[in-house]
Amino acid sequence: MPYNRCVRYLVTARVKPGQSGPLEKAIEDGTLGRGSVAGSEYLRNMAAAREMPDGVIIWVEVCYCDTPLAEEREYWEEYFCLERVQNAHARSRCRDLNGAEPWACGDCDCSARLEARLAQQGRPFRPGASEPLRPRT
């Protein structure tokens, strides 16, 4: 049985009212997630996050907790209302979970196709962006 149960999650969230500015500052000064064992993962997540036309922010996150985002949740919930957290890949093919390669999620490409599709949707997320995203017509 694998010992760390790492999984990649597709996170869907909305910035809480009044938190766009503080989130932007935390990203700019590198303090987002300060104190968490996840370290720079928060900044990596925000660099890859996408904003959809309806204002939803989506990103793929690597999590080593038994409960999804158990470590990260308190840091995210300071700025976001987390709407959905779901598996970003088929757990049955996870090299970490099936025991083939412990701690594989750190450098795994199992969600690369999903992340490539996301990169083509919406726009890069930048808190504090002044102009709303307009849906394509």
Image: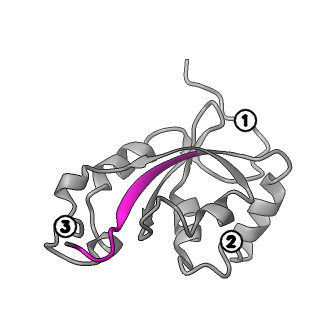
Few, some or many C-alpha atoms within 10 Å of disc 1 (few <14, some 14-19, many ≥20)? few
109 or 66, nearer to the observer? 66
Residue drawn at x 69%, y 68% is: 27
- What is the number of callouts on the image? 3
Residue furthest to the top in view is: 137
Q: Which mark is residue 32?
A: 2
Residue 110 in the figure: left or right of residue 88: left
The x, y position of residue 117, in whole percent, is 37, 43
Where residue 43 appears, as percent x and y from the top left, is: 59, 69
Q: Residue at point 54% right, 53% down? A: 49
Give the spatial CA distance, label 3 vs label 1. Answer: 40 Å
Q: Considering the numbered disc 3 on the image, is that residue within a helix, a strand or a loop?
A: loop
Q: Quadrant of the N terminus?
A: bottom left
Closer to the eye: label 3 or 2: 3
Q: Position of residue 67 (x, y in %)?
A: 46, 61
When the figure is inspected, residue 134 is found, relative to residue 46, above or below; the finding is above
- Lower position in the chain sequence, tag 1 or tag 2: 2
The span picked out in magenta is: 2-12
Residue on which the image places disc 1? 132
- 3D distance between C-alphas at marks 1 and 2: 24 Å
Q: What's the mark number on residue 20?
A: none
Tell me the element at label 1.
loop
- Image position of 79 with respect to 108: above or below: above
Dot 1 amino acid type: Pro
* Residue at 27% in and 68% down: 108
Per the image, is 7 magenta?
A: yes
- Vertical placement of residue 100 versus 124, above or below: below
Amino acid beneath label 3: Arg
Q: What residue is shown with label 3?
A: 95
- Between 86 and 52, the one lying in front of the other is 86
